[in-house]
Image (cartoon, coloured by chain):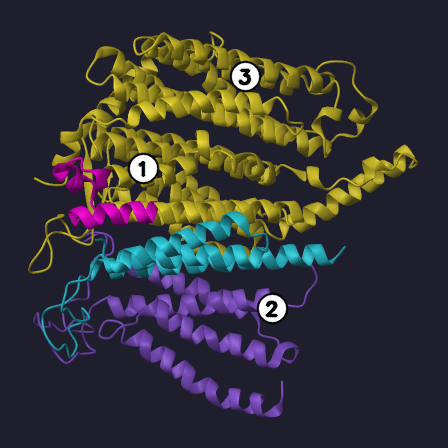
Amino acid sequence: MIHLIILIIAIPLFSAFLLPLIGKLNEKLMKFWVGLTLLLTSFLSIFLYKLILEKGILAYSVGAKFPSLTAPQGFPVRIILIGDALSGFLALFFLFIAFLAFLFSLKILGGYHFLDPVRGQNTLAKAQKKQALLEISKSLTRQISNGVDKFYTLYLLLLVGILGFLFTADLFTLFVFYEINSIATAGLIAFFRNKECFKSAFHYLVVFAVGSLFLLFGVGLLYSEYGFLNMAIIASKIHFSFLDKVALSFIASGLLLKAGIFPFYFWKPEAYNASPVPAIILSIVSSLSALYVLFRISFDVFGLNIVFGEILVLFSVISIFAGVFLALRENNLKRILAYLAISELGYVVLGVSSGFLMSNTEPGLKAIEGGLFHIINDILDVGLLFLIAGVILYISRVRNVFEIRGLAHKHPILAGFFLFGVLAISGMPPLNGFASKIMIYESVFHLSPVLTIMGILGSILVLAVLVKIFTSIFLGAPSEENQDYQPIPKVVIAIVSIFVILMFLIGLFPKQFVTSFISPAAKALISQQNYINSVIY
Amino acid sequence: MSKIVKIVSLIILNPIIIFGLYIISHGHLTPGGGFQGGVIVASVAILILVVFGNDINLSKNLFSLFESLGLIFFIILAFLGTFKNTFFYNFLANKFWFLGKTIHFGINQGFLNSGGVIPLMNLAVGIEVASALSLIAVLIMSKKKYD
Amino acid sequence: MISFIFLVTIFLIIIGISGVMFKKNLIKIVMSVNIIGAGVNLFLIALGYRSGGVVPIFTNAPGLNMVSPTPQALILTSIVINLAITALLLSLAVLIYKGNKEK
């Protein structure tokens, strides 16, 4: 049935509103409620994806049965939600990842690394140190568990924002969901309540307030010229005047700010350093959904004949290198992984924007498919690395991760998973990073061979950075403090292994994956006329 | 604050709340609506906090409860029209049993009985905004240590 | 020549952006974000103006020549969202201050 599109957005919203009341009653009931919501929404998204594959593009108008039912005179000013193959598939995948991250957050919220006064005192005996660590961990757990209902409320609101980004067909609902995302993420960044987290959250929110106001300014410019806010209707009426180009640059800067590409990536390291690990995974997902909206606007609203693609290719190549080079100077594991996330997003934009430039040719379609495929692999790889970083910080509670030595002796499974993550993110053959990166390299070669060389160089440098981390944390003789570390909960190992299994599956059977999921999505992205026809008929 | 300020603020509390409720309830006829009226009702809480300061304890749990109730009421009203028509469908309009008197298009003198779901949504938003802003004011001005 | 109100809008936005970039006091940064918000809202309302129009409300209206109501709905949402952001920024500023004071 057609109400599925709005139910996917409305059900997490409803449970996010109910959550403070339930949280006051009982904590276990609240966690069960969140898990039930996520499970129900994931099932609904499976049905929605099947419905979209049968019927093509679905357009759902909020408030009336057809988009054209309106007041006595005038055009429909209804809010319309559009789901097509790309957004249906991304919604399915993102909900699955959100469910896994929620299961992870039941045990580990990741990141006690700011508070560790014991390690500085060398005069305490070992038993006293262990006792003191246990007390700190107890008081920390008490402090964190007092705010856990707010964590899940913000988590669900961020999920609502991501799903709204995926299904919006209206420039103003885009702005509203952008703001929901920013406010929810700012709340999640300030979750561990110490001064550095508050400073990071303040910085993040100021940056995003200004960014969203720029987005609104661009939307206002487009509205002033055409009188409509609906993306499909603007697409049918557009003529590329100078005002359109200015509006596109404003909207694109707002969306690139959320995604974290070249001139606008400066907020990422502090934000990812300060927030809990499941929130980081949802932030990566929200950056990718902002990229999806950018592609939707540039392909389907502005059409395929604009200079914008060249600028995007330039920005993506610079961000691939900027991510890697800036990661070399850092000492903090989460910051390094944040820079690597910037670099991987550069690959996505490289693929899709070169497909934009080489439109209507065979390598162009393959480049778009490679870029969209890399979205999936990017979340899996970088998500896996962040999860393992969260586990390391949980069990060791150090401030500087590079003091740990020889973790592989006690936790060999964790070391193995980290090694798989390192190989996947740098594009080694049996894993999934190779499949999408080879598609990008081959198709970008037809645009310019220099881009392929830069892509390969970027992958090699990513491997260099990560191998350094791997050898310093996991290999070598174990230090004496390793015995004090807490054991890893079994659920966490199960969740991390689901990520690894998915990575292997996608890596070993990439062709089936691409033809069944990504090709319909890529075709749905480029066909502008289909998009317009779903609203105006 | 001096005694005159305290007594006058206690006297002027009630007309401010009534004025806020007037703006909430006439949202479909005159400028205003849920958000604007809610802010006016929330300014009462700020007035009390500024005048009385530490002598009065405004309870945070009550505000939190009303905020959640307002939000839940809003989204239940949105869901109620879903399975017959679409989400957010105005299922009370043009039916004339509660709020749905049919008004002709054009200039009229404003009938309170019209608008369908809109006055109810205004009420929900008004309750929610009033409690949320009062809660924010109580939390910012609290004298507790860094928690 | 561009109409006067759009020049005022651009002026407000430039003041706001320079405030965010160059000021170090947290409250001044929050105020600059509000000024940018005011500028963008003014821009959106000014788009809807029809000359000789009245407020677009049917209750006791003097005539049927009204300004466009769509931008007014847009800026209503925008003002609410900016209020929420300002509230969050100010509470974060108060918490940073309390953290600084404690030392």
Chain A display color: yellow
- Residue identifier under label 2: B141
Q: Quadrant of residue A292?
A: top left
- The amino acid type of the residue labelled 3 equals Val
Q: Is residue A240 left or right of residue A401?
A: left
- Residue identifier under label 1: A249
Chain B display color: purple
Check if mark 2 and mark 3 are on a common chain: no
Towards the viewer: A402 or C8: C8
Towards the viewer: C88 or A106: C88
Residue B40 colored magenta? no
Mark 1 against mark 2, which lies toward the viewer? 1
Estimate the x, y position of residue A109 in percent, counting from the top left. Answer: 60, 39
- Is residue A47 depicted above or below B50 in this figure? above
Q: Tell me what residue is drawn at x 77 percent, y 44 percent.
A: A136
Callout 1 secondary element: helix
Q: Tell me what residue is drawn at x 60 percent, y 68 percent.
A: B141
- The amino acid type of the residue labelled 2 equals Met
- Which chain is represented by cyan in the image? C
Find the magenta span and give its range: A215-244
Q: Is residue A12 visible?
A: no
Callout 3 secondary element: helix
- The amino acid type of the residue labelled 1 equals Ser
- Is residue A452 depicted above or below A331 in this figure? above
- Residue identifier under label 3: A462
Q: Quadrant of residue A350?
A: top left
Q: Earlier in the sequence, mark 1 or mark 3?
A: 1
